[in-house]
Amino acid sequence: MSQIKGSSHRCISEARPGQQATQQLFSASLELFSICFTRSPCKDVGGRPLSCRGRPKQSFSKAREGFRINSSFTQDFASKNHIEAMNNSSENKFARKPLAWKRIVVKLSGEALMGRLSHGLDHDVLTSIAADLKDVAARGVEVAVVVGGGNFFRGIEGADRGIERARADSIGMLATVMNALALEYAIEKQGQAARTMSALPMPALCEAYSHQAALHHLAKGRTVVLGGGTGNPFFTTDTGAALRGAELSCDLIMKATKVDGVYSADPKRDPRAIRYDQLTHDEAISRNLAVMDTAAFALARENGIPIIVFSIREKGAILSALEGRGNATLVLP
Ligand code: UDP
């Protein structure tokens, strides 16, 4: 895995992540919308062909080890029976086999941090998530956490009320830093070292995000809490999570939600909606399944990063999902 991650890291580094991140996001989005899925031939620094930007082809087969997708999964919309058959397939090892991820990025929305409150932070929820993150770190997994800010402010809502969008998004990014500081404190209270890094420099409050410093903290076993999203307006923290996941050569993106995975339809509206155990990125696109927001998902797909979508409602949910316990959906390249 280290060889794979090294290759990915080199490719991303060549693209100068800080300066060209925005460009990469736009190109990823464009590729998604084109839906033609043709990839230009690309080689890594060793001259080996890449099947996507940043990851050599063999990384896909590595990532798939132990969780092969049912090959009969067709382009047509899957029927209930088909999804159930796929989920029960003996080839589906996700629910049974513990996962061995080395470095992960967890995306926690502001909503996840507010628990049952209507806004702001629920202290008990923070404590519970912090304990969960500590347990994950104790298993030797390097953990970066990207936090949202929707429990305080969302730029799009500010824009709807007449605030210029870029300024409203700045307020939203500040909200994410508030959450990051609160989570950092909660993690430290559990006895686990943590560092908040903000994409927008705020030296009086926390470290400014830098790729090398983040890797350094992760290598030291510190949980890195990332605020400020991408540092740019018009993006979301989902995209921030995918961006940092690629930049930090993470093996996995964990997307915490209120539901326990990706469904064939909105489970709140359609009682017949079925949850997928596994999917590929391409299948999620062709079925219009909302895994993450569009730019984020395109970036994850472009860089061949698997995504686990899981519910954060239960205590210990992050570790459970990492170990393949409980319900979740694994999206593989
Ligand atoms: N935001 C931004 N750029 C980013 C990430 C976030 O401008 O890269 C702003 C945007 O206004 C967004 C707000 O921060 O609405 C909070 O982030 P997000 O909506 O992703 O939070 P979540 O819904 O996950 O709590």
Image (cartoon, rainbow, N blue to C red):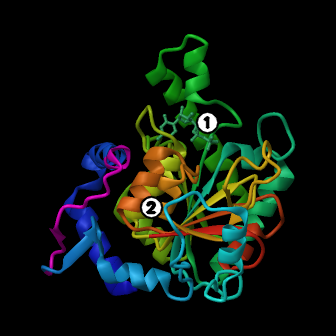
Q: Which mark is residue 282?
A: 2
Instruction: Choose between 227 and 255: the one closer to the eye.
Output: 255
Label 2, label 1: how far apart the Cα atoms are? 33 Å
In this rendering, the answer to whether 126 lies above or below 280 is above
Q: Position of residue 98 (x, y in %)?
A: 66, 87
Residue kind at label 2, given as amino acid type = Asp
Residue 209 appearing in the image = no
- Asked whether residue 61 appears in the rendered view, the answer is yes
Mark 2 or mark 1: name the one nearer the start of the chain. 1
The quadrant where ligand 1 appears is top right
Where residue 131 appears, as percent x and y from the top left, is 77, 68
Residue receiving disc 1: 175
The amino acid on which the numbered mark 1 sits, given as a three-letter code, is Ala
Is 39 inside the magenta-drawn segment? yes
Q: Is residue 61 magenta?
A: no
Label 1 secondary element: helix
Q: Which residues are magenta?
A: 31-46
Is mark 2 in CB contact (under 8 Å) with mark 1? Answer: no
